[in-house]
Amino acid sequence: MKNQTSNIKCQKSIFSFCFVIVIFAFCNLNFVHAQQVNLSMSPPIVQTRIKPGKSIIIAYTVQNSGDPTNLQFLIRPFTPIGQLGSLTVSQQLEGPVQFNLENADAVLEKPFFFPSKEKRQAVLRIHIPPGVPDGDYYYMVMAETVPAFGVAGQSTGVASASIGSPLLISITESGVTEAKATIGEFSFIPDYTFTVGKNVVRIVDNAKELAIVCSVRNMGKNLIQPQGTITDQFGDTKNKYNIIPQNILSNSQRIIKTFSDENLDKAGSTLILSPISAGNHRVTAEMTFGENASVQYKTLEFLALPLRLIYISFFSLLIVLGLFVVRYIKRNTKH
């Protein structure tokens, strides 16, 4: 009986000790509050031409729809990468273009407090020193949050985010820009390919989607915006798809897009053909890259066939022939 009483007292002591530890832990716990960052910036993109020795002023507006934060304005050069419109932003401000904020209460790369539900304007002066070579210079005007920590024992979740507006500057002494480009790729992936004499025949399944890829290679010193159409001709029927105006930056290559509902969510294609009428198709890209520039053409041809129906018919014929052969063998075996 004494041992049982002793065990109960021991269990109560352990329970009390654990309870005190839990309470102590909660009393000394620093709760972390995640910071909500929601910034917007306008204008979303700026494209301008400037002569050497000249300056312009552009006003950017940033709105904070999230929690209060510390913010700073940055400017960084960027370069295009790949064919999908991606870019890489440098870590340091480089290049001949000079930038300065005209705001009385703001300096580039100096954080300031940005309350919630407020707007802040950055009045940016852009100066091109004399003698800067003609060509394009690409920058990203950025608004970046600066991580902050709370006080009085409370810590906020460290949140760092940035939003940017591309600034595309074409420096030209004469005011004229260069349009030097070509259709870099115009292709598709056929289901079958074979050669008849000197002709290459490409066959596709008309029951599947066919992705056409068309990219433009810009070999000039200035950005361009290709204009034109891609036409799918089948017999006397022609379906035209207009090219969406897109910036192709200097010394880069990019896959262009068309106003096609099937193509809106296809990142790596220009045009999706679906459905496809059975028969011979001729797809032509026709585009120009600037004022007074010549029109460039590229053409693809393919034969669309109901391959699934052909497969089914072929295997059905094999099965019928197989059954006929088996029946013929059994009949001859009986005799």
Image (cartoon, grey):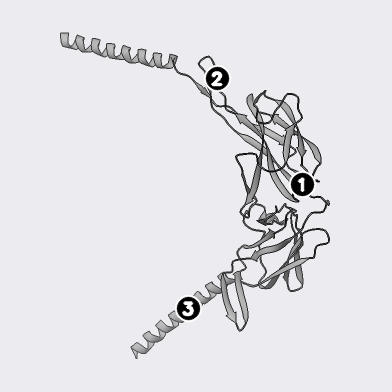
Numbered badge on residue 318:
3
Q: CA distance from mark 1 to mark 2?
A: 49 Å
Amino acid type, callout 3: Leu
Amino acid type, callout 2: Gly
State which tag comes first along the sequence, 2 or 3: 2
* Numbered label tally: 3
Please identify the quarter of the rendering in which residue 248 is found: bottom right
Q: Between tags 1 and 3, which lies in front?
A: 1
Numbered badge on residue 150:
2
- The percent coordinates of residue 38 (x first, y second) are 64, 31
Q: CA distance from mark 2 to mark 3?
A: 77 Å
Q: Residue at x 72, y 52 (%)?
A: 247
- The percent coordinates of residue 92 (x first, y second) are 62, 39
State which tag comes first along the sequence, 1 or 3: 1
- The percent coordinates of residue 112 (x first, y second) are 66, 24
Numbered badge on residue 205:
none
Image quadrant occupied by the N terminus: top left
Q: Residue at x 58, y 31 (%)?
A: 160
Mark 2: give few (<14), some (14-19) or many (20+) Cα within 10 Å: few
Q: State whether residue 129 appears in this view.
A: yes
Q: State whether residue 1 appears in this view.
A: no
* SS for dot 1: loop
Give whichever of 231, 169 is nearer the camera: 169
Amino acid type, callout 1: Gly
Residue 94 versus residue 208 in the image, above or below = above
Image quadrant occupied by the C terminus: bottom left
Give whichever of 56, 226 is nearer the camera: 56
State the residue position of label 1. Answer: 131
- The percent coordinates of residue 213 (x first, y second) are 64, 61
Mark 3: give few (<14), some (14-19) or many (20+) Cα within 10 Å: few
Please identify the quarter of the rendering in which residue 271 is found: bottom right
Q: Residue furthest front?
A: 131
